[in-house]
Amino acid sequence: MKRFLVFIVSLCSLFIFSLTVSAEIPRGSLPYSAEDTKKVLQQKTEYNRAYWTLFSLIASSAAYTPENGIETTYLKGHGWEFAPHRITDGKTTVHFITAKGSMSDGKPLYVIAFRGSADKKDWTADFVTAQVAYGGNTLEESEKVAGFHPGGTKERAVVKAAAEKADATVPPKVHKGFNSYADLTLRMLLTSGTYKFLEEYRREEDARLLLTGHSLGGAVATIVGQRLIDFGFAPDRLQVITFGAPAVGNMAFKQMYGDRMDLIRVTNTRDPVPLTYQAVLRNYKQFGEEVRFRIPKTFNNMNHFLNLYLDAGLKNYYAEADDSVKQGILQAEPDMQRKGADRPTVLLYVDGNDAGKKGGSADVKTAMQLLERFMLNEYRALFPNYVVVRSPLDPYEAMHTQEADYLLQIKFDAVTNQYNNNWFLTVEQTLSDKNGNVLASGSAGKRTSPLAGNILAAMEVLSVEKEELLKQLPWVQGNAGK
């Protein structure tokens, strides 16, 4: 993980608030320095891991609804280019997205996010427990080793010899269904004359590749990552981050291949899927660095859903951000920024910032505090020049004092339901000019719950409100490139 992060964060400035749309979602990752102490280096690594985990969660979620999902809309708003893919070969159908974005200094990051189980075919592949032999340095060789092509005696002999050399009692093997998904993906990306994604990535020597996915998608991402290394792709340019993924191979596979790839396996305390094969069948073993999210017991009937991982990932990210601020490594989220001499200044007035603290369950209060922080940061990212002021200060007096050109009054709120754990997230905004003329006013709301995904509700509500702002303020950052 560290070798990938050292490269990737060296591409980014310390605080990402550039005037052009960047693929780095606010607030960005942290660069390493030769002067970093051991303590600082450790905290930066923890922060960057949390940052890229949150990004990978959003990308993995986007893989489920790539054409019209709110996650795709959100990432496109930060400069990402997306392409959805659906490949079918016999009984196997693979769904994934490819994406490419630029860091703040223009260096490229390529992403492949695989969809988890979403239909009967996917679940059928999940429940297959048979294994096939793993090996080969080309796609043709790997399929011969697995027994999918005639011949392969020579290739399997090479695999057996390698296993004996590594003191493995049996040859390396992987899950047959997951392997079929991975090979089908690679067949398209490596041999098709139409898709140039991996070819373009390989040509850009300063680019990095991130593979990610949830559940079945995470298992496929793991095997694809290993295959790419087999086929000559540099392992130090590759990162794999998975969520709730089951084990993909046997002990020999772990022993021979587990240490050569940067793999972060994110699990949660109430999700049985990552240990299913390993617990039931002795011939499956997990590997990689495990990051474990703590999920409240009240969610134990829905513990594998990606939305739970998303909300836990947001909480984890802010916890690491706060620790970095305490250590003086990261700047606290600024309430004032003036970076565009030719751009107007917007006063962001947060009205009633006790949202989520009054009434409702403790879970809703905690979730709302995180979402308010997330949404306010999204508003900050829209404007090169802004000042944040909170009630009970007078907004018009503050506007005059700060010499602001526009006043944007924002109110975040949570309306709870006493009968179940569903609740409404609402955002009200009113935009006025410096003469007091109201240019736009409205509100948006979304019913949410742990199962529905709180961060997705926040993205959806913000999307509606941002569209209204874009109509009145064509110069804001969300309009870049439109």
Image (cartoon, helix red, strand yellow):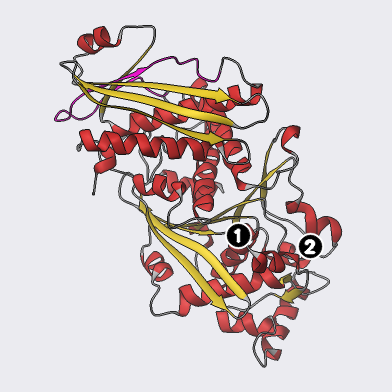
Determine the image quadrant of residue 339: top left
**SS at mark 1?**
helix
Looking at the rendered structure, the kind of residue marked 1 is Gly
Rounded to the nearest angstrom, the CA distance separating label 1 from label 2 is 17 Å
**SS at mark 2?**
loop
Residue 29 appears in the picture as rendered: no
Mark 1 surroundings: few (<14), some (14-19) or many (≥20) residues within 10 A: many
Looking at the rendered structure, the kind of residue marked 2 is Tyr
| Left or right of residue 348: residue 242 | right
Q: Label 1 belongs to which residue?
A: 217
Q: Nearer the viewer, residue 65 or 136?
A: 65
Q: Position of residue 181 (x, y in %)?
A: 61, 71
Residue 323, above or below 47: above
Whether residue 336 is in magenta: the answer is: yes
Residue 408 appears in the picture as rendered: yes
| Left or right of residue 420: residue 231 | left
N-terminal of the pair, mark 1 or mark 2, is 1
What are the residue bounds of the magenta stretch? 333-356
Q: Which mark is residue 284?
A: 2
Residue name at image x 74 percent, y 80 percent: 161
